[in-house]
Image (cartoon, rainbow, N blue to C red):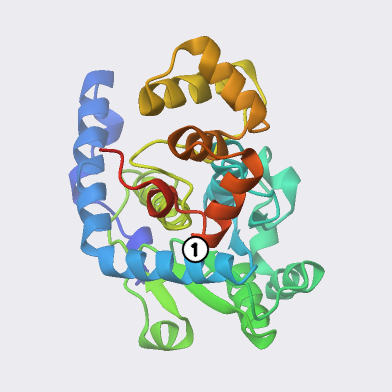
Amino acid sequence: MRDPRLTEQRNPRSKRIDRLEPLAIVELINQEDRGVPEAVGLVAPAIARAIELVEETFRQGGRLIYVGAGTSGRLGVLDASEMPPTFRTDPSMVQGVIAGGYAALTRAQEGAEDHPEDGAAAMDEREVGPNDFVMGIATSGTTPYVHGALARARARGARTGFLLCSPPPAELVATHDVVIAPLVGPEVITGSTRLKAGTATKLVLNTITTGAMVRLGKVYGNLMVDLQVTAQKLQDRGERILMELLSLEREATRALLGEAGGHVKTALVMGRLGLSAEEARARLQAAGGRVAQVVGDEG
């Protein structure tokens, strides 16, 4: 019987991939991958709605929690782990939950995805509540662990979303606050959703968190100004950002950044408006963290 899930169907264009030379394999996979951004673009309104929900969640002190199994779970953990170094967020602000626990990040725990009660328990352990937003990731749309987690999250009052790469059933759409379904089509290797579906998942998750962080004022122009200089690379990046925006020499920039406690956004407001660090932080807080509302556009 043919599996109705799009992610499990056979791709007619790759039926003879086992006979191809390496270059032809690359070309085939690349050709299939080219349709992924287009599929993601077609669900832009749903992704934008997710950004709105995540921004609202953060502004009320809540958390974004990804839940998935296998590749989907790993990509959620990856996106969550990149938020603190990129946008200076608290590690608890964006979290990734994967079936089988963190051991599943490096060694497959395939059976773990079959237990909805474990997904529910993960929500209880994190004390998910009304201020939180839980995004389930299951490219097939059927993973029991994810559905169990989302059902418990909703029961605890959280808002929920679902990301899949198969046409969503009407019940799924009616259940969640947002459903994102980029239809990338059958995989080159049947059922191997770490390929196109995985790529689409990463694009969507990157867009959601980046969009939410921009809305929170973590970016000025297209520069990562909400940056704490905690490493030599970040020190250099922070100094270069301030040198460009304030037209200062390196030494003056380094001194200003030191007065700001190593926080680039605070240093920028200090340098642009001639304020103390305390005054700059107060202005930023009053503006919801958005630099442009304090100092105007870049120019």
Residue at x 74%, y 52% (from the top left corner) = 101
Residue 35 visible: yes
Instruction: Assign a secondary structure to mark 1.
Output: loop
The picture quadrant where one finds residue 146 is bottom right
Question: Residue 43, image x and y in percent?
Answer: 27, 65
Tell which of 74 and 135 is nearer to you.
135
> Where residue 150 sits: x, y (%)?
60, 76
Q: Residue furthest right?
A: 125
Q: In this view, does 44 lie to the left or right of 287?
A: left
Where in the figure is residue 11, as x and y percent of width and height?
25, 51
Q: Is residue 129 above or below residue 236?
A: below
Q: How crowded is mark 1: few (under 14 residues within 10 Å), some or many (20 or more)?
A: many
Q: In this view, does 140 lie above or below 211?
A: below
Q: Which of 147 and 244 is in front in this view?
A: 244
For image coordinates 30% across by 61% down, the residue present is 182
Q: Which residue is drawn at 62% across and 79% down?
A: 158
User: Which residue occupies the foreground of this view, 42 or 213?
Assistant: 213
Tally of marks? 1
| Residue type at numbered disc 1 | Ala
Read off the residue under disc 1.
138
Q: Nearer the viewer, residue 155 or 208?
A: 208
- Quarter of the image holding residue 27? top left
Q: Which residue lies at the image location 60% right of the left edge and 19% below the top edge? A: 255
